[in-house]
Image (cartoon, rainbow, N blue to C red):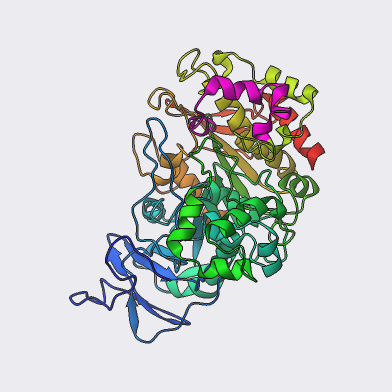
Amino acid sequence: MFLTCISIPFFTLLLPGLTVADSPIVSLSYGKYQGFVEGNLAQFLGVPFAHAERFRLPTEPIPFPGIQNASEYGPACPQQALGPLPGLNISGLTAPISEECLTLDVFKPKLVTSARLPVLVWLYGGGFSVGNTRADDLKPLVERSITTQSPLIAVTVNYRVNAFGFLGGKEAAAAGITNIGLRDQIFALRWVQKHIANFGGDPSRVVLGGLSAGSISSSFLSLNNRYMSNTLFRGIFLQSGVAFHIRPQSDGQSEYDALVQAADCTKSKSTLDCLRHAPFDTLMAAVNNTPSITSYQTLNQVWAPHIDGDVIETDAWTAVRKGLYGKMPVLVTACDDEGTMFSLPTLNITSVALHLFSHRFLSDDRFVGRPTNLWITFLYTATPVEIAQVSRLWPDDPTQGSPFDTGTENQLGPQYKRIAAFIGDDFEVSPRRFFLQHASARQNVWGTLNKRGKIMNVPLGAFHTSDGPIWFTNSTALGNFGMDALVSFVNRLDPNAPTNHSSSALFWPKWNTPSTEGDSSLLTFTDSDVQIIPDNFRKEAIDFLNEVRVRAG
């Protein structure tokens, strides 16, 4: 099924006037694609890596004769409508929409033909609700890799999101279509193994990375399951997201049933088959009627990965604690104020804080079945003693809230900074530190923290994903250390690039390297410099969250 918001075809014939030098051709097992050259890069856009049908697993691309054009991005997968956030424009990128959306983009040095270059496979963010490969521009990173004489290839991947990618319930489990979005990503990684050599890449030198939901996906894909192996990628770059607490597949039953009701499929012999053939607009309207990352419920999402006993076999805390994941080098990034953006949807901050930090949360009928504001299911079953601990560890004191280190400034409401601090600690800081604490004893891991933008980004501070320019923007003002570290990691599985030629020379110690003030080292970007600090801020609070997670196991 093909739907589009602009009247251009997905694939067109090779355009006249393009020379072979400007339009390189690559031969794949199912057809030939002609890309284009821009500056130092050869680009192949919108290349299908799989065939997609609604609520079915990805399959091999459909073969075709001749040469197809690969100079336009592929369509985005169906996107959930996002509501506005105060002062932010995150309504999504304008792009054609299609259910036949499993394409990827390849960016490579134009002069590479037969070299075996390392590869960065990239997964976009978007809260598992939205996103497409237009969202993150990796071209500057590839350009920088050429400058530093450590060239690499970047591959950005489309995957299905919201209900189309993460359908819950027993019917999806019985059909073997749980976590379709993650299965799309696995299929893309297998495509890279099979085809990247045709672009000059080395399938044995793949690093998997992503932003936000893409980072969380990368982390989940590293956990033990029967679909993945260390042969698909050898390192991971996690930008603002680590595998954390998610719900079991069965908890998505109410959302599945709501789709069935909206699509008038309740009397069908097979409700799943009925949904597969329901009018797209009807299904999309039902999806848009569910909470998203910009809704009042924010990170307590409807559409997200589930523990299905298949792609995700167990909860992340158990897997990490027992070492049930791929032992490979990992770079983990974070921002100081990860929770500010996600506290904005709260309509009545004072009222929400009352329920978050009070035992009333446990008995209020409005919260039965699902926590209303945060993706923190442990609060739903928390004891009054644990609730009291939350209230004490995240006090009603704006000077201790997020944006951190801003005193009484940046208060959008009486509880804004308090809730923002808790959200960030719960969904990012605690799983990140838990992973680093355990993984550092088994493999090489590095951690970093972004504190830039406290003044510029009022009232969000160093908000979720605001470290993007550090890793993907060629800027003399910011310095290129972040880009050089990532280029080096993709090439050598070590962010410390050689000090000769054009790369930066700052040394980045592994996370478990003792620092001057503690037993860990966190590379920290501030507005004025780059420094090493111990990863022990808010230690009592973070330890508490992880202890509760382990007990809930």
Residue 397 vs residue 38, the one in the foreground: 397
Residue 295 vs residue 544, the one in the foreground: 295
User: In the picture shown, does residue 384 fall above or below 507?
Assistant: above
Residue 373 image position (x, y, % from top left): 59, 33
Residue 527 image position (x, y, % from top left): 42, 26
User: In the picture shown, does residue 250 fall above or below 60?
Assistant: above
- Examine the residues drawn in magenta and state their main secondary structure: helix
Q: Quadrant of the C terminus?
A: top right
Q: Which stretch appears magenta?
A: 338-367
Q: Quadrant of residue 73?
A: bottom left
Queried whether the magenta region covers residue 5, the answer comes back as: no
Q: Residue at x 46, y 42 (%)?
A: 482
Q: Is residue 155 visible?
A: no
Residue 241 image position (x, y, % from top left): 58, 43
Q: Quadrant of residue 139?
A: bottom left
Relative to residue 526, is residue 494 drawn left or right? right
User: In the picture shown, does residue 94 fall above or below 280?
Assistant: above
Residue 313 vs residue 201, the one in the foreground: 313
Relative to residue 190, is residue 11 drawn left or right? left
Relative to residue 67, is residue 518 drawn left or right? right
